[in-house]
Amino acid sequence: MSEPASATPEELFPHQAERPERATALLRRGDFRRTYAAIAISELGDAFQYIALMWFALVAAGPLGVIAVRLADSVPALLFGLHGGVVADRWDRRRVMISADLVRGVVLIPVAIAGLTGHLPLAVLVVAAFVLTAATSYFDPAYGGLLPELVDRRNVQQANGLVRATADALSVGGWALAGLLLVVMPISAFFALNAASFFLSAVFLVGVRTKGRVGGPDAERPRITEGFAALKPLPVLASAVVVLGLAVTLSSGTWIVGVPELVRSTLGLGAGSFSLVAASYAFGSICAGAALARFPVRRKARASMLAWALYLPAYALFAFAGSLPVALTAGLVCGVGQGSSWVLINSAAQEEVPDRFLGRVMGLISLVHRGAHATGLLLVSPLFAFVATQDVFAAAAIAIPLMGLAGLAFSARATEARAPATSRTPRS
């Protein structure tokens, strides 16, 4: 018999001959529909909160306040991502998601009260951002592990594409709606709106029926190392996870500082134009999610690495941008590239990793993705203090696609090296 972590997921075999369902058909499944609604409502609340969080951080301490809050909502992924995966494999995943929602809702109540009374210091914002992302580090692996149960493994790409497109659309719509709501309510009320969205999300999740987990206080504790072992027989997926971390480190590090600096200094434009570029990125991600919800991709892990090649034309456009339309085009292509990679790598893991290890692998992917924003902010963003903005974009335009191609080459060699041994080892 083969090792448990390296066995082909038994859940795959019954569905190999079945065609994936349409994304809209998945919404007829009541449990997925409730989960979809839960995520959608919390994403809309997050859009309101993002505006309030960044604004209060800027008012409290200027650009350094924004950096402090951005670090606070990135670092917890590095601290809790792996443990979140262990919890998702030990406890009932639906209950983990509900608990995370309740924590996120509760922590925002005092923030909203402090904002409404006019006493909201930066320290409170930093702590709140830290706790919110820490709770998300438990929510995401649990959701990622639960999704195949809700829609079947053959449909995970369609479900992920639908959720991604909806989340990004709600983010853009939430930002626009926030501008209208500010006419009739204070910005600090957005914290209360997001708290309500998390509580409502928990209510939707209560109605989701799942198989539950075998784990509990007396069960054998899942080990983090088993999550890494589950990737050992999947060299393409393992390579895609490494590429994700490296590519997001570079792309987020250049985007967070580089794009606003490009808009301000090179194009001579203001915050409104930067908002349009950010919206173009979201629109590109929406397009990617909608396309992947409609068109199944066979080799998802490989395609996720290939998607980073889109950063070559995207960042090249940023490097030579002389007008806002060029920057908008670049932002859109970036959104298509990273949105596609994110949907495909999650779908690949949900298709290929056995259920008993899936939470830990999804936790690792979440850690790599969210944690890379922190490493990008720390390691890449400071380059803009010493190197011209367009030169950094030009270098990143070459480096990011090369990472994807290197991952493809390495995984191909690893697969070839593993093939003879696999052919001699009978599957359990």
Image (spheres, helix red, strand yellow):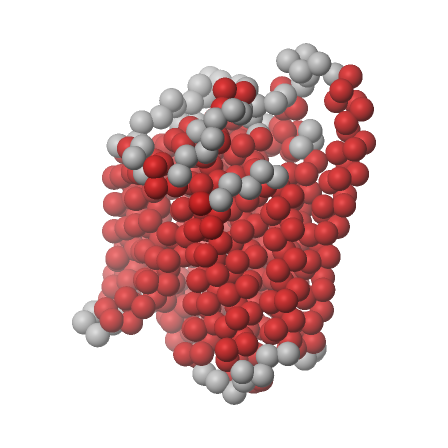
**On the picture, is 233 further left or further right than 331?**
right
> Farthest residue in the bottom direction?
268
The answer to whether residue 155 is seen in the rendering is yes
Asked where in the image residue 46 lies, by quadrant, the reply is bottom left
Q: Position of residue 152 (x, y in %)?
A: 44, 29
Which residue does the image show at 54% across and 20% down from the upper left?
A: 13
> Farthest residue in the left direction?
184
Which residue does the image show at 30% across and 50% down from the upper left?
A: 41
Residue 269, compared with residue 182, is above or below; it is below
- Residue closest to the eye, 60 or 294: 294
Q: Which image quarter holds the C terminus? A: top right
Residue 10, compared with residue 386, is above or below; it is above
Which residue does the image show at 41% across and 56% down from the upper left?
A: 168
Q: Position of residue 217 (x, y in %)?
A: 44, 21
The answer to whether residue 384 is seen in the rendering is no
Image label count = 0
Q: Which image quarter holds the N terminus? A: top right
- Residue closest to the eye, 357 or 128: 357
Residue 372, compared with residue 219, is above or below; it is below
Q: Position of residue 228 (x, y in %)?
A: 65, 33
Q: Position of residue 292 (x, y in %)?
A: 48, 47
Which residue does the image show at 33% across and 62% down from the upper left?
A: 173
Asked where in the image residue 36 lies, by quadrant, the reply is top left
